[in-house]
Amino acid sequence: MDAHDFWLFAAVLAVAAVAGLLSTFLRQPLIVAFIGVGILVGPVGFGWVVGEGEMELLARLGIAILLFLVGLRLDLHLIRTTGPIALATGLGQVVFTSGIGYLIARGLGMDPVTAVYVAIALTFSSTIIIVKLLSDKRELDQLHGRIAVGFLIVQDIVVVLVMIGLTAFGRQTGDNNMALEIGTVLGTGIGLLAGIAVLTRYVLPWLLPYIARSQELLVLFGVAYAVSIAALSEWFGFSSEVGAFLAGVSLATTSYRDALGARLISLRDFLLLFFFLNLGAQLEFTDAARQFTEAAVLSVFVLVGNPIIVLLIMVAMRYPVRVGFLAGLTVAQISEFSLILAALGFSLGHIGTETVSLITVVGLITIGGSTYLILYSHTIYRYLQRWLTPLDRSKSRAADIAGPETDADVIQYGLGRFGGRLADRLAASGYRMLVVDFDPQRVSANNREGITAVFGSAEDLDFLETLPLNRARLVVSTIPVVETNRTLLHALRHHDYQGRVALTAHTARDAAQLRAAGADIVLEPFSSAAAETLTMISDEVGPAPAADGERERKNPKQ
């Protein structure tokens, strides 16, 4: 695109905005729309954009900011709180998907190097898309949501390591001495890491307080730092993506990471537009018929095979089939990292444009398809439940992790902010408390007097068999998710529980649904807190002026 053709640039952005609006109506991620716009305005379509020049520069900036934010928000604590399941599922899915994907690619007639790239591209799922969809459905804090985010972080770490390996050894020639090459890579890598470590330990803690005095300067510093480390990494022989990721990691432990990350998200989304536009403009469809067959086979594997792999791993670890199925659906697509990996392989000369196009087409199909799988995950599970139930091994797991012999007056689900305070109040009132929580760290850290905590989930219906329901007078769920609470209520009836049930809702609509479902008590913490706050304010400052005026109108002085 001509650097001075401002009108053409504006036209591309206008087309992207219209496509994005259409995408939101269809409940599709904007990635699909932007790649489609790239095809439309690229050589295959109108021919406005070619994959070089200013568009390519903006695309590279977008990738750098994306990986900088991934490193900035790298939360190893989340992996620890979901226990070994995140690590086992993340690594297990990577190994099995890449292995099976390689065999499928070879069966489709690809050469070994191309098959490796395709297999690896099929492995990684989109953290951005999954977190957005789960957040919209309010399922990030449910068991399957936390596990999904945990193994997505594992995947992000793996993909960065893969990119480091590719860029480190990608430019080797047959005449190079392997030992010397490895030594050079290790030396430069250690030097780069040592330099970043020095910055993290000595320079950034001193510099950032001065920079943070101006929010505009903080944003400018974040972009400049990410791009500078990315360029330095490229100069050392690694990829700019690796450098940008390490730049984010170096700031992840500072107190400014949240402020910096929040201000860069919009810039990331805008610049990624150009990455996907550029990617779409580079696609070639000269052999579309053959690619369609390959893309269909690979897409079916990602849409069906990846969820099955995750489901089987979680079932083997004796998690409920329902939790494994819902978590598995989150990996039924390839990610933006897969597209970045394909672009990296093309720049290294390992694969051609036809392979990049194939991976991108698979991305379009799987991202679009998985969106609907995640949005209607519960409906799909209910349809498949009778075929999936024989796989369930969670009963034996429930017996291992629970099975307390102590009596309990109250069984409560959830030990979070609201649940923890409620359990404290009930225990202080003399009730014997048994609290179930799916966060193993909360359970192990529990030292509250009169409260026994066990690891479990409200979504694990067979877990109820291990609880003393026949001795409990009340079952409380502090989880504000209607679907989970209705499922728990149904399971309690199935187990012929005779006590009372209290469920939590955050909105009036949710509260009405729980009452209609048969809950004895509906807890509305926000509504109750607002009413109590109003009482406190009235006691301190007196009635509102409007109330005084109303009384004067009703009782005018004679």
Image (cartoon, rainbow, N blue to C red):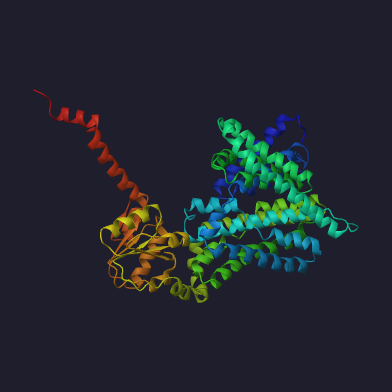
- Percent x, y of residue 419: 37, 56
Q: From this view, report whether residue 404 is shown above or below residue 554.
A: below
- Left or right of 228: which side holds 256? left
Residue 118 on image: x %, y %: 73, 60
Circle count: 0
Q: Report the residue that reaches farthest toward the top.
A: 558
**What residue is at 60 percent from the left and 31 percent from the top?**
217
Please identify the residue farthest to the left as the structure is shown: 558
- Above or below residue 538? Residue 160 is below
* 389 relative to 364, above or below: below
Quarter in which the N terminus is drawn: top right
The image quarter in which residue 8 lies: top right
Q: Quadrant of the C terminus?
A: top left
Residue 161, given in percent of the width and then of the height, sits at: 70, 56
Residue 270 location, quadrant: top right
Residue farthest right in this picture: 175
